[in-house]
Amino acid sequence: MIRLDRLINVLGGYGVRLCGRPQARSVQLRSVAMPDPTDDRVAGDVLLAVGAASVAEAVRWAVAARSAAVLVRAEAGAAHEAFSAGESEDVAVMLVDPAVSWSQLTGVVYGLVLEGRETESGRGPTDLFALADNLAEVIGGAVTIEDRLSRVLAYSRSQQAGDPARLETILVRQVPDRLRETLRARGVFDHLASTDEPVFVAQDPRNGLTGRMAVAVRAGRELLGSVWVTCGSPLTGARLGALTDGARTVALHLLRSRASADLERQVESDLTVRLLEGGADAATVLSQLGLAPGAMRVIAVRAHADTERHAAPLLAFERATTGFGWSRPGRSTLLDNTLYTILPGEPAAAAREWVAALQAALPARVRVLAGIGAPAQAEELPAGRQEADECLALHEAGAPRTAPPAYDESWGDILLQRLRAAARTGRPPARGPVSALRGHDAAHATHYAATLRAWLEAQGDLAAAAERLGVHPNTVRNRLRRIGEITPLNLEDARQRLAMIISLAALGDD
């Protein structure tokens, strides 16, 4: 079963919208029905009101079918009628744009509701747990089903032949790093990647491992995951056959669940791109994403891994979209190698916590750098994306272990970054006070450009400038006099002082 919220998230990409009854989003859906003139016993949690002449008729059909929600094709002007009818009859009414065909929606609705166990974008399909229980009963050992990154998708309830390593794996929802390294050193993962033949893993008391039989879960040549069963010696005969057959059944479940998860991710990604690029009805798209109006921040993330250059951004996107829309605060998309997430809320601290949680959820080998846009309303999100990009560039240029910068807190650094970028791409002045001082410093090992900058930043305070430079105030005074001899400067002219500050900042002199 799935929640109505999840169905709304996906159908929003087809122009379907819920009219009123926000409390209905938590309703669990288990069945789908369509009107049948020959059968007055039609019943289902979701009714596809095919052929309804009006919203009122569709709602009457839904009441008769004991449906929690009904989809009806109607113009946008029918929203008020849909709201009133739904409230009075306790039915969630979803309006379908007349331009959208029933054939487009039927497959999606049936697929999501009837195949709608929680998928790999959540905590793994619930029927995998039943499959793990069945395998454990047949084989006589405790079963764990994992994805290709050694994260737990399902496990049997039976603790028969269980061990400390299995318990820890289930508690942290993935194979502990030390055990994973041991299995890698033994060549277990290489074996699973290269063949469908089960492999026996001998006991390892240091890691609390009593023994395992493992087999790859594969679709064609693609490794989807693995099935593990605790056993003291290699499986043979019917027990071994049950394990290999079980792996093929797990593959079918994972393929179905991934198709559902990919559909949700694609809809979310497309809608998020529309908000970030602008030009659309931002309020409508925001509603389709299940986000409330208000302040939001755009977060730009780049994930890096030395040995998995292209895989790291995909891992970050997968992790950012883990959990269904109603259970996650943000909405994400992956453009080129940058992950963009729209996160509700105004505090920059919340955005940094989100980045930290993403980093913690990724493998240790993956490094995350990020930038955070200023608070923005829906129509301002394109500007928020640009701000996030600039903050990301600032983070990439700085110390990697520093907190991700936020635009409203770092706009001064962003401005200087823009000036430096313009200076690198444009034609820097070949002559002028700053160029003359830099040339003199290079030729005579002097420090006049740095002295001028310190004096300007200290707003003419000789003592403060001297402290910054680590010299005596008289030294600063003498250098300023010498600077006046090298190049004509009028330090009393405010416009010249501003121009020199900009020039020094753009050229990056310290």
Image (cartoon, rainbow, N blue to C red):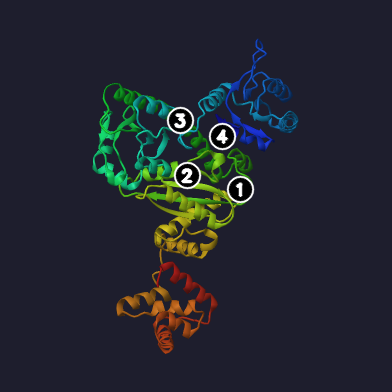
The residue lying at 69 percent from left, 35 percent from top is: 21
Q: What amino acid is at disc 4? A: Arg
Asked if one can make out residue 362 in the rendered structure from this viewpoint, the answer is: yes
User: How far apart are labels 4 and 1 at the CA level?
Assistant: 25 Å
Mark 4 secondary-structure assignment: helix
Disc 3 to disc 2: CB gap under 8 Å: no
Q: What amino acid is at disc 3? A: Ser
Residue that label 3 marks: 257
Farthest residue in the top direction? 38
Q: Quadrant of residue 166?
A: top left
User: How far apart are labels 2 and 1 at the CA level?
Assistant: 23 Å
Judged left or right of residue 199, residue 349 is right
Residue that label 4 marks: 6
Farthest residue in the bottom direction? 474
Q: Residues within 10 Å of mark 2 (few under 14, many from 20)?
A: many
User: How far apart are labels 3 and 2 at the CA level?
Assistant: 18 Å
Q: Is residue 70 above or below residue 415?
A: above
* Residue 295, numbered circle: none
Q: Position of residue 381 (x, y in %)?
A: 56, 49
Q: Quadrant of residue 169?
A: top left
Asked if one can make out residue 251 in the rendered structure from this viewpoint, the answer is: no
Q: Looking at the image, is mark 3 or mark 4 earlier in the sequence? A: 4
The C terminus, quarter of image? bottom left
Q: What amino acid is at disc 2? A: Ala
Residue that label 1 marks: 379
Residue that label 2 marks: 320
Q: Residues within 10 Å of mark 1 (few under 14, many from 20)?
A: some
Q: Position of residue 29 (x, y in %)?
A: 59, 28
Mark 3 secondary-structure assignment: helix
